[in-house]
Amino acid sequence: MGEEYLTIKLTLTQLNEVQPEHVEKARFRARIEQSPLGASRGPGCDFKLTVEDWKMINQFITLMHARDNLKKQDVVKLGEQIFTLIFRDEVLEKYHQCLGKLTNGVRLRLAIAILTEHLVSVPWEFLHDGNSFLLKSRHLIVRIIDELAEKKAPFSPIRRLLVAIANPGKNDPENASFSPFDAQAHEQKIVESLKQTGISHEILNPCTRENLKDKIRGGNFDALYFAGHGVFIPDKEGQLILEDDKNDEDLLDATELAEWLSNPDDYNSARVKFAYLNSCSTAKSPSLNPFAGVAQRLMRDGDIDAVVAMQSDIEQTAAFDIAADFFKEMQLRRARSPEQALALARTSGGDQHSWGVPVIYTYLSGPEDFDKNRLAYFLSAEIGTSSYGLFLPTFVLGVLTEEAAPETRLEPAPRYFYPNETLSLKDMESGLDVIRLLTRIVPPDDIQFRRSTDQNVAQCSHWFIFGSRSNKVVSSILGRDEYTPRFAFDYTSEPGKWILKDKELKLSHHIVAPHQSKKGEYDEKDDIGVIEKIVYDKLGSVFFLLSGLGDRATRGCGWYLYKNWELLLKEFGNSPFGIVLKFPGGFSFSAAERLDKP
């Protein structure tokens, strides 16, 4: 599981109206509106920023562009000063109460809702509580926009990334309006970072207006990384600097980019849910229009779940290093949300302050939902859309239901007669482990049960099929024309043996047929099971086979999937896979061993 976070919602409001040129006369209020321990007592703590405060903040922001102009003591001083502004009295008391709850790896997540435009430009990411910077203590600081309706479970793993790089003026650096950079080197670094992540990507270099629009509107990506220049023009809005066909700069308004993102051509395909804007001033916004910044506009109009952007100018090398490490951390197979990945990557800046320049805009609900989405990714499922069912073999007096004609049924015991269908205890226990897994992403009432005699698989997108010889659905699934089976079960070629054939590794495993074993003998011998994920794209169906040669292995396969899905995620991502498990005789099924690796 990923790291756990205790989320505090801190709201910053303005108490009086002032003209922008007299912001030093403004009075503000900070209050903890939500936390697991409730809100802070009272109305909150009031504060104001003097002329000297604003001078220090603006000077700090100006110096952030140069790599070595800020010293550690300058950064600490700013961080402590802005911390003491908003954490005082009852607000500070609640903050310390929440810190007292941070045990067993739980960390703080400070979600700041800034309801006054004057405070958007304050670099809150540098908050220092007198002991350390919050971000350098592995806590999280995010910005949320109260005007936006809250989304449920916004975070999900990135699967398909569009890497867009714009470098206008590279053909004529001396006359370029924006300093060209080594785009090829940065592209190579990003590609290298993505190699082990499991994230598929496409490079768009050079990035022009038309090809960026086509790629976004095509609906093939769920994330966008833009590397290039950005600019904020007072009284207008934030802009990205693209290239035209002649390598001259082409300014793209935030409004136009948001429109592309919110209206893909194919509404059934993926949409961009996360954007990383490695461009100066893309989180900057004017006091009179809080949604004129690129990041803010994408959150409001672009249907984006989270945006990383720069709150000021940032030194180029530091910005590129942070981005490269971000994508190393943002692995599909790790417990890394964008917030977590950015927190870990910030240290790559290499100076005293660049780590605090990136801002992440998102929603109040955050990393606590990420594991749900990782599980859904592993299952190749969509939360809220996919449906789930369990196929379990049924028996009548010890005979499989489909074979249980009256003349073939076993004679009932003298004192007990139950002529209806029932389930194998171990199959059911295996199914309960799968239910424990599925209920992390779907209510229990939404999980269907089906008998193995009902082979209509069209009613659910995801089926979990238990057993091998006892479940006819297994042979039905393995025998489909769309699938080349890796495994085969053989119960007849060698009398007294049940055999599993692994065609990929060209190996066979067998057990003595349990029904021919003496009482207790089966439990003392090894059993063999298979977990296989099969994806039929044409049917829109996903099948998980939990198939043991004996019922002890079937039981163990359900337990193994429940306990080890994260390890399987790291190994296979959301791809189809198959593994072979041995359950040693005389031991609990929890002593499973992998046999599928040569």
Image (cartoon, rainbow, N blue to C red):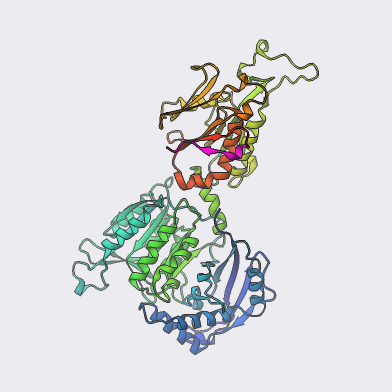
> Where's residue 390, x and y in %?
59, 33
Q: Tell me the residue at 43%/71% (across/down).
A: 355
Q: Which residues are magenta?
A: 588-598
* Residue 203, quarter of picture: bottom left
Total number of numbered discs in the rendering: 0
Q: Is 480 rendered above or below residue 347?
A: above
Q: Residue at x 66, y 28 (%)?
A: 424
In the rendered image, the residue lying farthest to the top is: 407
Whole-percent x and y of residue 343? 48, 65
Q: Quadrant of the C terminus?
A: top left
Q: Is residue 278 visible?
A: no
Does residue 204 appear anywhere in the picture? Answer: yes
Query: Residue 389 location in percent, x, y?
Result: 58, 35
- Relative to the observer, which residue lies in front, 230 or 483? 483
The correct choice, above or below, for 353 with respect to 324 in the image is below
Query: Residue at position x 38%, y 77% from top?
Result: 234
The answer to whether 531 appears left or right of 348 in the picture is right
Lateral position of residue 194 relative to residue 551, left or right: left
Q: Is residue 474 above or below residue 343?
A: above
